[in-house]
Amino acid sequence: MIGKIISQYRILEKLGEGGMGIVYKAEDTKLRREVAIKFLPHNIVASPEERERFKIEAQAAAALNHPNVATIYVIEEIDGESFIVMEYIAGRELSEIVGAKGLLPLPDVIGYATQIVAGLQAAHEKGIIHRDIKSANIMITEKAQVKIMDFGLAKVHGGIKITKEHTTLGTAAYMSPEQALGEDIDFRTDIWSFGVVLYEMLTGQLPFRGEYDSAIIYSILNDKPESITEKRTDVPIEIEHIIDKCLQKDKGNRYQDCGEILNDLKKITMALDSGDSPAPLKLIRKKNKRLKAVVGIIAALFFTILALFTLTSIFQEKLKNPKIVNIRPLFASTAIMEGGAQISPDGTRIAYQSDQGGNFDIWVLQLASRQKRNLTEDFEGIDSRPTWSPDGEFIAFASSRDGGGIFVVSENGGYIRQVVSLPYKDIRGLSWSPDEKK
């Protein structure tokens, strides 16, 4: 193929190959410019009907004119070969950069992410869904400009429905749940894939992994990604919130358009530029610093009284004339919010809610050793209102996870089971039945 002339294009070198075709660098002999040519696999355009659909949708993508989208010049078919002629971009794939650096600097991540979303927003406004957003389809130029590639394989929203065998077109690790299931997709499938790319830039890993496509898809449909804070410590919680919202399995709970993501990214950028958030969580904590100080003092007094009551209850049978010899708070920090305390039936432990980890989780404190343990660190939303089971082996709690509801976890932590599905805002109070069955 190298050196061959097809139409007006002289093939210069092979740039890459994948499931969506082979890409060559070529010279446009008429316009004297370098271009990239992608030859499509025959299964993408197997029938006349599919070739026509592809042509219509590729033409729509060619109408995109945005600095963060690789320009498509022409779509052609010669001797049964369909190919796209597009802008040649001198740079590196984002996947290559992530592979080489591992953890990208936070300013680079935010800069790339903002440009990616801007390019997607331009496409979505024209009714075009990319449906194969991944780090290998994003080029970074020497000037750090993002170029989204392969819009020629995009789908026009509301266009002709493709055949069943193609409904999962895309790369498994970046597919949205609805895309993996072969269901109808819309712009929110690109938002999911962007969330995967953002996670990848921050951690150097994909959020959903497996040795086979089927294992990856199972993970997409059932698992939650590991927390980014376990991978690095310089990520503001707001970025985690963006990823969490992009990767909601129910597309109705995701961002509904790219404009919302851009607004959140701009807020983070402004805060970082102003120096207000050099460390994780500071953006949120600074706003509530004064309120938390007051609440922290009240919480410390509350736990002091609670500790006195608990210790008195434990030893009242052994002490005929109990005396208060010392009062000390169980918690003395004013920088965190704690509450909802519940004493275990045997009086040896306290379950409570605390935002010590950056968001409200359920914690258990051993009164004798004063050791504490986070039972719900797997979720970055709100877990609250812990309630002991009568035998002291389980804790029920309210949570905003999975759309909201009532959940149960062992007092030792581990598997978390949902028992009631209910919006978090509608949960008023929790209590166990005497038989512990509900």
Image: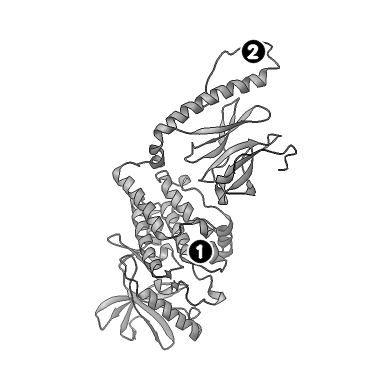
Residue at (47, 76) in percent of width and height? 159
Residue at (30, 46) in percent of width and height? 273
Mark 2 neighbour density, 10 Å: few (under 14) some (14–19) many (20 or more) = few
Disc 2 or 1, which lies upstream in sequence?
Answer: 1
* Residue ID for mark 2: 322
Q: Where is residue 4 in the image (x, y as percent from the top left)?
A: 34, 84
Mark 1 neighbour density, 10 Å: few (under 14) some (14–19) many (20 or more) = many
Q: Position of residue 408 (x, y in %)?
A: 64, 43
The single residue placed furthest to the right in the displayed view is 435
Q: Position of residue 369 (x, y in %)?
A: 58, 26
Residue at (32, 67) in percent of width and height? 66
Q: Which amino acid does label 1 sit on?
A: Met
| Label 2 to label 1: alpha-carbon separation | 64 Å
User: Residue 350's image quarter?
Assistant: top right
Which secondary structure, mark 2? loop
* Residue ID for mark 1: 175
Please say if 1 is above or below 196: below
Q: Where is residue 34 in the image (x, y as percent from the top left)?
A: 28, 76
Q: Which amino acid does label 2 sit on?
A: Pro
The single residue placed furthest to the top in the displayed view is 321
Can residue 348 be seen here? The reply is: yes
